[in-house]
Image (tube, coloured by chain):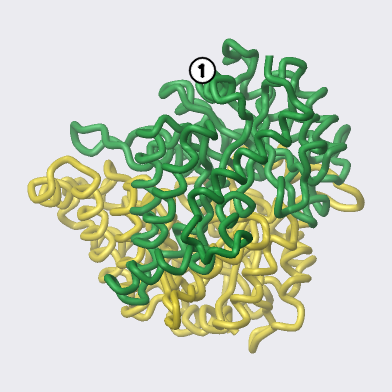
Chain colours: A yellow, B green
Amino acid sequence: MSFDVLQKKIIEKRNPTVAGLDPKPEQIPPHILKMACDQYGETLAGAAEAVWQFNRGLIDALSDVVPAVKPQSAYYERLGWRGMEVMERTISYAQERGLFVIADVKRGDIGSTAQAYADGWLGETQVGESACSAFHADCVTLNGYMGSDTVLPFVDTCRKYGKCLFLLAKTSNPGSGELQNLTAGDRLVYQLLGDMAERLGTGTEGDYGYGLAGAVTGATYPEELRELRARLPHTFFLVPGYGAQGGTAEDVQYAFDRKGCGAVVNASRSIMCAWQKTGKGGADFQEAARAAAEAMRDAIGQYVTIL
Amino acid sequence: MSFDVLQKKIIEKRNPTVAGLDPKPEQIPPHILKMACDQYGETLAGAAEAVWQFNRGLIDALSDVVPAVKPQSAYYERLGWRGMEVMERTISYAQERGLFVIADVKRGDIGSTAQAYADGWLGETQVGESACSAFHADCVTLNGYMGSDTVLPFVDTCRKYGKCLFLLAKTSNPGSGELQNLTAGDRLVYQLLGDMAERLGTGTEGDYGYGLAGAVTGATYPEELRELRARLPHTFFLVPGYGAQGGTAEDVQYAFDRKGCGAVVNASRSIMCAWQKTGKGGADFQEAARAAAEAMRDAIGQYVTIL
């Protein structure tokens, strides 16, 4: 199963982290943005070209340090279809460089529509006699507010194509408790969503004991993280909120099992925008990102030992 | 405010409905799909061209009957960036024909990412000195599971650009009650999300009394619909689930206020795929869609009078 693929890459690189690729135009090194805009004008086409050049540089710099990347769809959709074209190219390029790709799309919709999303992001679409794939990510993030019947098409598609998914449980943002920490029936709402992931993954556990349905639980709420780890023994975790959002290596240690498996920690800005802190105007964005990714790996390594 | 724009169009056409544009390749009339695939092959490019021809034909046929269309993003994403290009073109074309466009994207993410989505779907993105717009819809659907801080960037963007949004409250799918009908604190979860919409819209009420934050509440649950109407006097409703999903004209009457305002009912398959029931192989897809839209308008008109 697909979390096996991710877990193996994590073990190979001794690094349970994923680098977010969330490029805002204003976070791209000026020389890259200028070159793209000289060619395409200050347009969405120019911004998309700049994002592509930036992403390619980041992937080249990071591909032997991190096991995975996580492009956040919002930053590509923002640039319209040209951004989505760069999203597709970024996913392909990262996979060619051996990286596992989590498409951070947080989709969720009624059954037939969920199937269309699953086809587009993980599977294939039938056009006449041909099966065509669009974004072909390895994994997606999903929002289960609408109920488990809206997640099932993704589960089926993951089974068919050897892929996996993360369901939002306890998110990293300040207001996540507004709904997620309420008591609903016999448990808290984020527990209910975590339980949904555990249940949907039952019977699909791979070599490391994890089913194909993982859960998102933020580094910014270490108590909930710890408690969900104990509650959901077969659920792989995606842990956002490390770094710029305030989560620390100490906080994320609770996401892992006793073998140092079962979780991947995301950092976006702290890696992608590391060049903003070196005073070199972005000329060193690759070295800066790589150094930040290594520092993150080593910081987490102080608390988590992968056996 | 933007629900005024929609409400005015509804009153002009005496029709409180929205036609969903959710084109699956297999639901496109065969002659359209064949012509597109002859030109582009059985590829995503071929499917995207077919979707565009189908959408354009539907918009031409419907633009003086319905006030609004609702493209569902999943069916465009499924075709990769080529599908997203057709989504952009469809939105532009519908607006040129005087239609209000609800982009059914059900997005939701942490603050900075939510801002990127809002920029992409409703607002603008700064590229150097230029402000560029991508999908420029009039309205979006959102998922508030992550909390109201994740909806606020959309509220701000709506205020700035005169747009509006719908927050998922009680969705039309069979499993929606799994989370949405649980008691969380002093109310049910779908009520909490409905209350969130009412609160976020406070102070933005327009000529008809509705704020910029609407709510989604399915025709398949008429009791919840009725109760939410009473609970949320300033919240405009988007009512999916009519027709193919089982909701009837009798069911949706409860979504409207005493003046017949404050709601719009969606039908997708029953209009888009009306050609599948006439036995003419799709040659009459425009006439069939138009007749289905008129029948839906008239059916709802038996229960709802727009004053």
Which type of secondary structure does the marked residue at label 1 adopt? loop
Q: How crowded is mark 1: few (under 14 residues within 10 Å), some or many (20 or more)?
A: some
Q: Is the residue B229 above or below the residue A64 in the image? A: above
In this picture, residue B254 sits left or right of residue A34? right
- From the top left corner, tell me how far across and down residue B151 is, in percent: 57, 35
Q: Mark 1 lies on which chain?
A: B
- From the top left corner, tell me how far across and down residue B270 is, in percent: 64, 52
Quarter location, residue B169:
top right
Observer-nearest residue: B207 or A254? Answer: B207
Quarter location, residue A153:
bottom right
Instruction: State the residue at coordinates (45%, 37%).
Output: B118
Asked whether the viewer can see residue A46, the reply is: yes
- Say which quadrant the C terminus of chain A sits in: bottom right
- Say which quadrant the N terminus of chain A sits in: bottom right
Observer-nearest residue: B194 or A57? Answer: B194
Seen as rendered, the residue at the extreme bottom is A207
Mark 1 = which residue?
B1
- From the top left corner, tell me how far across and down residue B206 is, in percent: 57, 13
Observer-nearest residue: A169 or A263? Answer: A169
Q: Which amino acid does label 1 sit on?
A: Met
